Amino acid sequence: MPELPELNPVVHGKLRLALLSLLSGVEEAEFTWLRSRTGSTDGNLGAQLQKLEEAGYVIVEKKFVQRKPQTLYRMTEAGREALTEYVQALKQMLGAAIGV
Amino acid sequence: MNTNADEQELKDRLSLIETMIAEGRRTTESWGWTFVLWGLAYYVAIAWSAWGRSTLAWPVTMIAAGILTGIFGSRIKSGRPETTVGRSMLAIWLGMGISTFIIMLSLGFSGRMDLHIAIAIIGAMLGAANATSSIILKWKMQFACALVWWATGAVSCFISDSQAGILFLIAIFFCQIVFGFYGMIAESRKRKAGRNGQEVSHA
């Protein structure tokens, strides 16, 4: 019987997984947009985004647009690969769970 | 945790990924209002050029509609993420708009403007832009609009001035005004459905 893959703990967190999935469909996204889509609090969202940033899965860009601060997040190639590998591992584990 | 619970959790994770990816894509679909705005702009330009007999009617109305689209578009886009699909749509419609504007302006200033030629060019351009958008967005109703525009452009070459004018007004009504409102209703429904989606508030 083949060995089941380990799930990446950085990606596995529910909010972090939601953030990576959201960012995979867009080029870049503002902090406020990510907050509205996930229904998360500022503190929790900031902490989870920092973990993703430390893992090298997202990069952050801070700038001013019409004198208003804007924090933009973009998924990196490493983040995309991590999400793809996570989905593959998930599917493999599900296949094993239902005996396929 | 037992095996059933594990399996359910894995399924929930997959479902969450699908929901969030769909959520990201959904944000690009808010263009219905632009069809209504440009449909009304065409009617204003037609009325102004017919009754006002001004050569400035079309260029002024089109520039004004372009500025309004830019202002409303930037307000609506504010805070929303940029997507490849969104940039593709902008490229298609901007390219179509600039091409049509340059050709129509050149025809107007050279004195070679003819109603049949104008409708044929607008029909072909709008047909191409609608068809390309509909293929990218997988939107059958928009492809139907492309067919109507292509037919309008082709048929206008064979009929009288007044018939071509009426055909153009009808095409604008269905492919801009009606389609625009239909798009706005469809987008509103999708947004409501999205709000009922799940919230993800823990790590």
Image (cartoon, coloured by chain):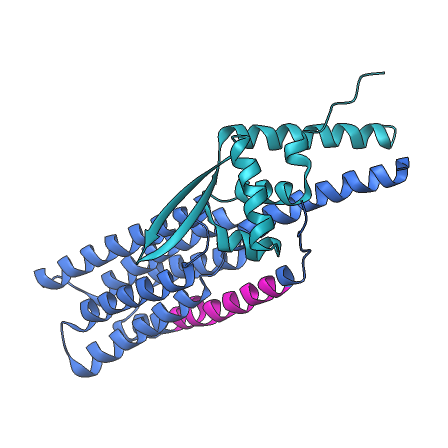
Query: Can residue B13 be seen at all in this image of the molecule?
Result: yes
Name the residue rendered at 45%, 60% in the picture.
Answer: B145
The stretch drawn in magenta includes residue B120: no
The stretch drawn in magenta includes residue B182: yes
List x then y, in percent, for residue B46: 26, 75
Magenta segment's dominant SS is helix
Which quarter of the picture shows residue A68? bottom left
Quadrant location of the N terminus of chain B in the rendered image: top right
Query: Can residue A57 be seen at all in this image of the molecule?
Result: no
Q: Please say if B145 is above or below B170.
A: above
Q: Please say if A92 is above or below B8.
A: above
Q: Please state the extent of the stretch shown in magenta in the rendering.
A: B170-192
The picture's colour for chain B is blue
Left or right position of A84 against B66: right
List x then y, in percent, for residue B85: 45, 47
| A5 or B193: nearer the viewer | A5
Q: Which chain is cyan?
A: A
Name the residue rendered at 60%, 55% in the picture.
Answer: A41
